Amino acid sequence: LNKPLALSQSIKMWEQWFQSLDEKPYRAKQVIKWMYVDFVFDPSQFLNIKAPLRLKLAESFDWTLPSLDSALKSSDESEKFLFKTIDGQFFECVLMPFSNRVTLCVSSQVGCKLGCRFCQTGKMGFTRHLSLGEILFQAAYASNHLRTQNTERKLTNIVFMGMGEPLDNYDAVVESCKHFIDKNFFNLSHNKVTISTSGLIPQIEQLGRDLPIVPLAISLHSADNELRSQMMPINKKYPLPELRKTLLNYPIQNRHGITFEYIMIKNKNDSVEHAKKLVNFLKGIKAKVNLIPMNTHPGIEMEASEEVKLKDFQKYLSTRGYPAPIRYSRGQDVSAACGQLASKKKDELDFTPRSVARLRKSAV
Ligand code: SAH
Ligand code: SF4
């Protein structure tokens, strides 16, 4: 008989389970806290729960976890963790220490359905959603990793910019965000958990009702409807004028309004003409634009814009009131940069075996 996976239980499911045993529902919080805050997945160690109940927990659930397949550390100090699920799927997260913050880039799906032309994850297609537990596990693992590193540093920010389209896995992602900002659990500041989306309109509207306090990032990449449809097939379903309408009505709660991600691709979307279109698109929206020089990968014939194009584009935006920092991706040497997360096999193809071994060693 297959036992239910502990990792797949939501707080509601734990509550119901405890109540079915005539136990108080607050036990659910204790279990969640042990698992994701303390990184303890052995119920015999849940010491605020009495022994018979601990035994019952151990017996009733399968406590297997995703295993760490590999950890790769970049020369810029960011680290990529590759996990393997019980059903043999691979997913990744990337830990990025900056001077004043530590950001974790998490995955929401294995692969992605949306097939954006410039994205490695998009190229691999869709395998399955990650469960709530698998999303929380990434943050729990990273926090625990920091604790073991003899550093005072703690996880401060989470961005849904790993594999997958977070709003396509809506319930698990929104529920995980609630855990990230919950004082009892991860206790992150609500404006430090960012959901990045390619623009799924109905889900954006739903998010505005369910959880408007977490920052929203829109992967725009072009304000020209035709070009955007070429780059991002989802734009045919949810075209720019409708996206703009949705964003104009989005309840904006944080200081910066909405963040727009704009990959700068050489001779594609990087002229001042394109910047002009972008400013038109943004009119009336409180916006900040992150300019990301395209990360290249094998099999995709697009490259990053030249420096002068980046600067001109940036200047056009900033002189019109839109801050537009240029964001160089971290972790490029370990295929951990935006749009480079894919399957394990693909990653290792990018390395000679010896350099993989070396990186693995340095990650320990
Ligand atoms: N699916 C979501 C979140 C994951 S992608 C989304 O699209 O927003 C995270 C970010 O990486 C997005 O802004 C995406 O557009 C960007 N990205 C994808 N491929 C890239 C590449 N080759 N170079 C730079 N950024 C890329
Ligand atoms: Fe999916 Fe985002 Fe990649 Fe597009 S950019 S394919 S939405 S992960």
Image (cartoon, rainbow, N blue to C red):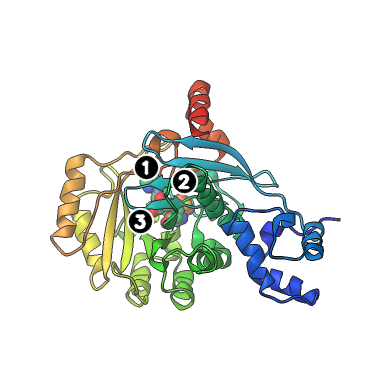
Tag 3: residue type? Arg
> Foreground: 351 or 114?
351
Which residue corresponds to mark 1?
Answer: 330
Q: Residues within 10 Å of mark 3 (few under 14, many from 20)?
A: many
Q: Earlier in the sequence, mark 1 or mark 2?
A: 2
* x then y, percent, for residue 43: 73, 57
Q: Which mark is residue 94?
A: 2
Residue 339 lies, with reference to residue 285, above or below; the image says above
Q: In terms of depth relative to the viewer, which is nearer, 16 or 83?
A: 16
Q: CA distance from mark 1 to mark 3?
A: 25 Å
Residue 362 visible in the shown view:
yes
Say which quarter of the image contains residue 33. bottom right
Viewer-side residue, 167 vs 328 = 328
CA distance for labels 2 and 3 = 27 Å
Residue 146, how many percent across, how many down?
Answer: 48, 47
Residue 226: give x, y in percent of width and height.
Answer: 34, 57
Tell me which residue sits at (59%, 58%) in the image. Answer: 36
Mark 2 or 3: the one toward you: 2
Please name the amino acid that badge 2 sits on.
Answer: Val
- Kindly indicate whether the residue at mark 2 contacts the one at mark 1 (C-beta within 8 angstroms): yes
Taking the spot 39% from the left edge, 62% from the top edge, the residue there is: 192
Q: Secondary structure at mark 1?
A: loop
Disc 1 marks a residue whose amino acid type is Arg
- Left/right placement of residue 276 relative to residue 201 reads left
